[in-house]
Image (cartoon, rainbow, N blue to C red):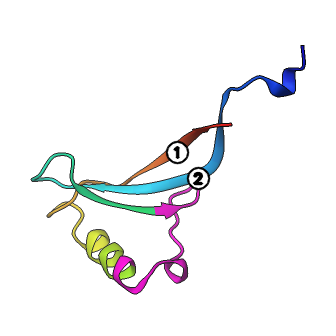
Amino acid sequence: MNHAAVRRPMQTGRFVLRFPSLFDGGRGFAFPCDALGQVSLDALSPRARQNYLFASSAVGRDFGVPAVVAEARWH
């Protein structure tokens, strides 16, 4: 059996930084980031950059503490 052909979940290295809404469950913002939660502002669109800066400044008021979430994919 060729073990390389076995399909299994593996991390692709993609992460998102999620800011959950404090008032509307299931809503909030998510931005691409690295494993440490660092977001590249230069890689964001102008609107996404504006949303990121808003969410970052509203933690504790409108949004919960952000969390880094890894996205698993099947390969």
The stretch drawn in magenta includes residue 38: yes
Is residue 10 left or right of 2 when viewed as pictured?
A: left
- Helix, strand or loop at label 2? It is strand
Observer-nearest of 39 and 3: 3
Q: What residue sits 52% from the left and 65% below the top?
A: 38
Quarter of the picture holding the C terminus: top right
The stretch drawn in magenta includes residue 44: yes
**As shown in the figure, which amino acid type bears the numbered disc 2?**
Arg
**Image mark for residue 70:** 1
In the rendering, at what x and y percent does residue 22 appear? 15, 53
Q: Which residues are magenta?
A: 32-48
Whichever of callouts 2 and 1 sits on the residue coming sooner in the sequence is: 2
Q: What residue sits 35% from the left and 73% below the top?
A: 52
Which class describes the residues within 10 Å of circle 1: few (<14), some (14-19), or many (20+)? Answer: some
Is residue 17 left or right of 64 when viewed as pictured?
A: right
In the rendering, at what x and y percent does residue 46 appear? 39, 86
The residue beneath circle 2 is 14
Is residue 28 left or right of 75 when viewed as pictured?
A: left
Furthest-top residue in this view: 1
In the rendering, at what x and y percent does residue 17 appear? 43, 57
Whether the residues at callouts 2 and 1 have beta carbons within 8 Å, the answer is yes
